[in-house]
Image (spheres, rainbow, N blue to C red):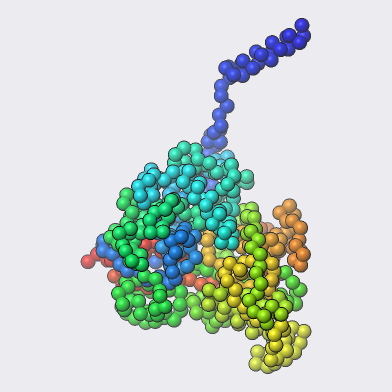
Amino acid sequence: MTDVLKALGATILLVAGCSGGPPVRSDLWRDQPYDPGSLDLPSAAASECPDRSRSRTATGFRLALPGEIDPAAAPLPRTEAERHVFHNLYETLVRIDCEGRLRVGLAATWQAYDGGRVWTFTLRDDARFWDGTPLGAIDVIASWRRAQDLCERRGEPSPFLLFDPRGPGLAPAGARELVIRLDVASDELPLALVHPALAVVGGPGGRGWLLGSGPCRPDSTTGGGALVLVPTPGHPDAPPWRRVEVLTDGGRDPREYLDIGADALVTREREVVAYYAGRRATRVEPLPWDRWYYLVAPAGPDADRLRWTAGWDRLELAREVVAQDAAPADFFPWEPAEGSCPAIPPPVAALGAPALPDADVRASRDADLVLWPGDDADAGRLAERLAAIAARPIGADPNVVSRGPLARPFPPGPGVAAEALAVPERDLTAHLQAARAGAVILPWPRRLPTPCGELARLLSLAEWLREAGLEPGPDTGKIPPGATAARPLDAAEPVRTLAIARRLERDRTVQPLIRTRAHLIHAPDLAGFGASFDGALELWSAGWQSR
């Protein structure tokens, strides 16, 4: 009888559970809206933001940009020209202007819930690709997963600091609503979504371009090799002009562009800026600082690190060595806010360091080499200067040949002289991961607006670099062979972001050298250019002054 009663009770409970009680809601988190406060960043100096205050007419103009443009590289730029063009063709969910203010992009609104652990982004009703196809939440997810693959193939640090785009934390909640669930609450998620790799791309759009949704689009009717941009119909930021012709350099002297028909020019060369600054018929406007150069000293004896990281002066490097408009660099463009860095993303996939290209170099000790990416002339100039300094004793008169514990024979011979060696850009990361050289000159384009985000990207380049920056604890793993164990944090270093940066500098693992920027040069009556936080031009607001 007891068994019968038990079975009957179980049956009653089962029936009640199926038909009686109210269904359990899966969106209870929406009942807990959360206000993360203002996400605006410290304003850039007024001199670093182009003037957007003038009225404009609808005629077009010609813009000259340095570097080549490969449509297949979109949306993550590799050249100066791609950086400016892609920014106008492809949209991120949010954007940050030159003055540090958070602006709408593809997303019209966003809201945090559950103390900052859940975020929703609602796309604009008029969000469409250039071909008129509606752009929805599933398109964003597909594009972000592609971005993760793209960065892995290029050896670029992951753009995802707070969540995994391939995991369950990213999901659509309707045709135009995207939900992001974080393992650790963050007030700054929107700031991490302005990485250029997270600009949304679609399928093939013709002439090698992937479809975008930005205020400008390539003109599909233009033949030949010229790139012409035209307004995107129906976009809320569609420009007033009819067309912009983009000129890329083919070995021409930039000082000739405005004399042969270009109306505006972007350049990083200090001599070109000085040349146009002396002409009354042009206007010169600096863009935000957007590229840092770091000296990274892989794990090794303290004496080797010392020889690379001492004896030079940042101001002298900025003024005398490089050809760009440059200034001495610190880790951060401004003091980071109180709080902790986001989780450091997984290290860049091991690329496998190839053999060094020269027989004499292969015979030398790794500690005698400073490597630099061969496509960056200023990285080469910095490497040559530091190699010359490293070849003499610390503190020695540069004009006197002498010997000491850090000296090298003079004249130098193969295998014993400090030497600067150019390697392909992708190979540079591979050599850095393998701690292959005594030092590496690392150009670092700015991708994220916060000091914390940039530092997290930097530490993810190599496992040994990550360990060098983090204090011992649950975040650290086994110290790789040859790496220097991290020292405990000082009690006077309460902010983790600053503590990591100070540790890297104090241990001579990473030294900021210089920061550089581009300049916009244009006819005086061509105005209205905007810029992003990373110096990318916003062409949609530009045009000729009304007469």
- Looking at the rendered image, the quarter that the C terminus falls into is bottom left
Q: How many marks?
A: 0
Front position in the image: 135 or 37: 135
Question: Residue visible at 69% across and 71% down?
Answer: 436
- Reply above or below: 473 against 504: above
The answer to which image quadrant residue 27 occupies is top right
- How far from the left and from the top, in percent, is residue 501? 65, 64
- How far from the left and from the top, in percent, is residue 385? 60, 82
Residue farthest top in this picture: 1
Residue farthest bottom in this picture: 400
- Looking at the rendered image, the quarter that the N terminus falls into is top right
Whether residue 465 is visible here, answered yes or no, is: yes
Question: Residue visible at 53% across and 36% down?
Answer: 30
Front position in the image: 376 or 24: 376
- How far from the left and from the top, in percent, is residue 512? 61, 71
Question: Residue visible at 73% across and 86% down?
Answer: 407
Question: Residue visible at 72% across and 86% down?
Answer: 408
Whether residue 337 is visible here, answered yes or no, is: no
- How far from the left and from the top, in percent, is residue 289? 49, 68
- Reply above or below: 120 against 354: above
